[in-house]
Image (cartoon, rainbow, N blue to C red):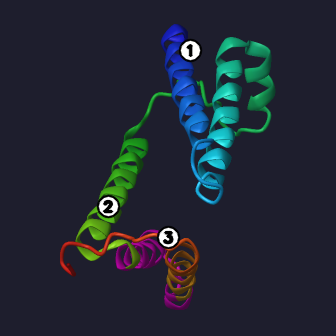
Amino acid sequence: MKNEERVFIIALLIITLLMTTLGFHFSRGAKILPLLSGVATSVMMIVLLLMVCSAKIAAWYQKFETQSVSSAEVTNNGGKKKEVSVVAWFSGCVAAIYFLGFMAGIALFLFLFLKVWAKESWLLSLLSSAVVLGVVYFTFVYILRVPLHEGILFE
């Protein structure tokens, strides 16, 4: 299993480094995000590769984790329910964005997630959704002038 992990991580690292290298060809303003995310992702891939290749590094990392990333824990029914829940919430978020658009979909998803799954108060759920909506609008639409998906229901 470790050989497959190594090959997979190396392949992801190569793809990430290629994408980061391509970011240098963008204009000055457009290259910031690809370079920052590419470098951060490459560093994470290198750390993962070192953990897979070295038992000492993996043991050192386990000090910071309550449960090891590479442990062979058998998933019980509670774990499977949690995985299904995560997939369902993620799928719902994607569907909301597709049908309602990015702005409405993200706000609706965050509100429902906080209210239903996290069982937060109405005030915190509404306030968090409004703040995230404002930050996303200000960052992407106002500053970066990125056209966000408007949703097939609002086209």
Q: Which mark is residue 94?
A: 2
Which of disc 3 and disc 1 is earlier in sequence? Answer: 1
Q: Please provide the residue range marked out in magenta.
A: 104-126
> Label 2 near label 3: C-beta < 8 Å?
no
Amino acid type at image mark 3: Ala
Mark 2: amino acid? Val
Question: Is 135 inside the magenta-drawn segment?
Answer: no
The residue closer to the viewer here, 46 or 89, is: 46
Is disc 2 in contact with disc 1, using a CB cutoff of under 8 Å?
A: no
Residue identified by numbered label 3: 118
Secondary structure found at label 2: helix
Which residue is the extreme one toward the bottom? 123
Q: Which residue is mark 1?
A: 6
The spot of residue 78 in percent (x, y) is 41, 46
Q: Is 91 drawn above or below residue 54 in the view shown?
A: below
Question: Which of labels 3 and 2 is toward the front?
Answer: 2
Residue drawn 55% across the image and 11% down it? 2
- Mark 2–mark 1 Cα distance, whole angstroms, equals 31 Å
Callout 2 environment at 10 Å: few (<14), some (14 to 19), or many (20+)? some
Q: Residue at x 54, y 84 (%)?
A: 134
The residues bearing labels 3 and 2 have C-alpha atoms spaced at a distance of 19 Å
> Number of numbered discs present?
3
- Would you say residue 105 sits in the magenta stretch? yes
